[in-house]
Image (tube, rainbow, N blue to C red):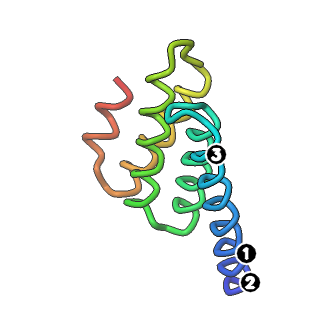
Amino acid sequence: MACQRDGALAEAEKYYKQALSLREKIYRANHPGIAESYENLGTLHFYQGRYRDALAMHLRALEIRQSVAEVDAVSVSTSLHNVGGDYWMLGRYMESEKDRC
């Protein structure tokens, strides 16, 4: 069962990366669609136990979302939540607490 899941996650990663590549070609650098692609990749890495990779993707999504003039508070809060979870799983309890405050 785990092998099947790992195969499905690897397949999902391939499609998420293709979507990101296409979005980067058609949208401006800080477009919400690009942030969504980074968020998806980060969540996938999180489920794979690749917490450092997840953190990098989630931080990039957060950076994009916070740079947009019409900030979407729901998306920003989702990104903050995911970054906190990544730090938590990395054992960085203090950094996770700092992000929350």
Q: Is residue 84 left or right of residue 40?
A: left
- Asked which secondary structure carries label 2, the reply is helix
* Label 1 crowd bin: few (<14), some (14–19), many (20+), radius 10 Å: few
- Residue 47, relative to residue 24: is it above or below? below
Q: CB under 8 Å between callouts 1 and 3?
A: no
Kind of residue sitting beneath label 2: Gln
Kind of residue sitting beneath label 3: Arg
Q: Is residue 3 left or right of residue 68?
A: right
Q: Nearer the viewer, residue 33 or 83?
A: 33
Lower position in the chain sequence, tag 2 or tag 3: 2
- Asked which secondary structure carries label 1, the reply is helix
Quarter of the image with the C terminus in it? top left
Q: Residue 3, how many percent across, how many down?
A: 68, 87
* Residue visible at 49% across and 67% down in the picture: 49
Q: CB under 8 Å between callouts 2 and 3?
A: no
Residue ranking furthest to the front: 25
Name the residue carrying label 1: 8
Name the residue carrying label 2: 4
Name the residue carrying label 3: 23
